[in-house]
Image (cartoon, rainbow, N blue to C red):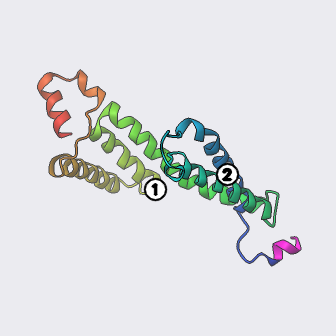
């Protein structure tokens, strides 16, 4: 441990990884700024659609780079990888959600929810039959609440197109 590492009061683990990921993401955003924003003719400088996003992204690159430069440790050690593993477990839930959102238009809201809620309960560690049935009941209650009482309009699944006319209409409207 260097003298600078000893003087640094806060946890060091994961900071290098965070700084590298942050700078890479900021540079990626900066590279896309020209494609995603534009200058509008006849608009004042500070009201330009590109101005404030550019200020924010350039600030991200600048301050992220300064953070990376001033870190007390510039090499990865075992606690960094342990921290990365913890972060990855959080990202796993984002991936589950993205899969859920992708599958809903294909299978429909009811079947997808009835599949994913017990899967999530299983993933969390509740593996008894009782908990799986409770989760399926909860999933059904959520669908009924959203579609019937709250009247949230969620498009029907593509799989509904293969059902007979009356059943297809009922499922698209209610589930």
Say which quarter of the image contains residue 102: top left
Quadrant (top left, top right, bottom left, bottom right) of the C terminus = top left
User: Which residue appears at 50% of the width and 39% of the height?
Assistant: 41
Q: Residue furthest left?
A: 166
Q: Position of residue 55 (x, y in %)?
A: 60, 53
Foreground pick, 96 / 50 = 50
- The residue to which callout 1 is attached is 124
- Would you say residue 53 sits in the magenta stretch? no
Of the pair 95 and 128, the residue shown nearer to us: 95
Residue 104: x percent and y percent?
A: 34, 37
> Does the stretch in magenta take in 3?
yes
Circle 1 SS class: helix
Name the main secondary structure of what is drawn in magenta: helix
The residue depicted at 59 percent of the width and 38 percent of the height is 34
Name the residue rendered at 58%, 54% in the picture. 56
Quadrant placement of the N terminus:
bottom right
User: Which residue is found at the position 69% from the left and 60% from the top?
Assistant: 63
Say which of marks 1 and 2 sits in front: 2
* Towards the viewer: 110 or 76: 76
Tell me where the magenta segment starts and ends, as one range: 1-6
Disc 2 element: helix
Q: If you read the primary sequence from the N terminus, does the residue marked by circle 1 or circle 2 appear first?
A: 2
* Circle 1 crowding by C-alpha within 10 Å: few under 14, some 14–19, many from 20: few
Q: Residue furthest front?
A: 42
- In the rendering, which numbered label is found on residue 157? none
Distance, label 1 to label 2, CA atoms, is 28 Å
**Residue annotated with mark 2:** 21
């Amino acid at each position: 441990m260097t003298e600078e590492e000893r003087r640094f009061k806060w946890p060091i683990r994961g900071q290098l990884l965070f700084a590298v990921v942050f700078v890479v993401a900021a540079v990626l955003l900066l590279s896309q700024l020209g494609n995603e924003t534009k200058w509008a003719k006849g608009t004042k400088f500070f009201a330009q659609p590109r101005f404030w996003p550019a200020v924010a992204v350039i600030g991200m690159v600048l301050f992220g780079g300064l953070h990376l430069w001033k870190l007390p440790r510039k090499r990865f050690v075992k606690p960094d990888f342990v921290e990365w593993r913890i972060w990855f477990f959080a990202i796993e839930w984002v991936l589950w959600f993205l899969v859920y959102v992708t599958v809903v238009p294909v299978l429909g809201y009811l079947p997808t929810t009835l599949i994913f809620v017990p899967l999530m309960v299983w993933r969390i560690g509740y593996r008894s039959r009782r908990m799986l049935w409770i989760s399926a009941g909860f999933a059904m209650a959520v669908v009924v609440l959203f579609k019937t009482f709250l009247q949230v309009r969620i498009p029907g699944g593509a799989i509904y197109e293969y059902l007979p006319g009356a059943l297809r209409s009922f499922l698209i409207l209610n589930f």
